[in-house]
Amino acid sequence: MPTDVDLDRTEKAMLAIGGSVGLSALLAPTVLQRVFGIPSDQLTGAGSVGWRLFGARNVYLCARALTGHPDGIAAFGPLQALDQAVFWHAWSTRAVPRPTALAAALASASLVALDVHRRRGAR
């Protein structure tokens, strides 16, 4: 198991964003949902499970990256690209309030942009 972790600023930013959103979704989905514009009384059981699954995925990727596994950080961009499809579908179908879908898409887009920057070799 790799343990020598040398993360650049871009990777640290990705982990900070992904990790904070992931931990929030895992530990306090009601709070995170409220931050993204959905009233806490609208969190359903299925919604709570969804937020926690999303959080577990992000926390797992961050943990992999922080322990030196290159696949941890490498998976962020492709998974965020898939998340973009989910967020824009939610926006177009109004599955959640449009400002919520837009905020989630913008947060995800920041990770996509950081991943593009990282893959271009900027250190």
Image: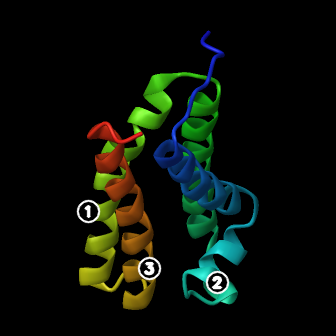
Q: Secondary structure at mark 3?
A: helix
Q: Quadrant of the N terminus?
A: top right
Residue at image coords 58%, 22%: 68
| Residue under pointer 3 | 103
> Which of the labelled discs sits on residue 34, or is there none?
2
Say left or right for 84 vs 73.
left
Q: CB atoms at circles 1 and 2 under 8 Å apart?
A: no
Q: Position of residue 50 (x, y in %)?
A: 54, 59
Quick check: 97 above or below 7?
A: below
Residue at image coords 42%, 44%: 76
Mark whose residue sits in front, 3 or 1? 3
Identify which amino acid the numbered label 3 is placed on.
Ala
Q: Residue furthest right?
A: 27
> Which of the labelled discs sits on residue 54, or is there none?
none
How has the structure been colored for display?
rainbow
| Residue under pointer 1 | 85
Judge whether residue 97 can be spotted in this image.
Answer: no
In front: 91, or 65? 65
Q: CB atoms at circles 3 and 1 under 8 Å apart?
A: no
Quick check: 86 above or below 26?
A: below
Q: Position of residue 88 (x, y in %)?
A: 27, 73
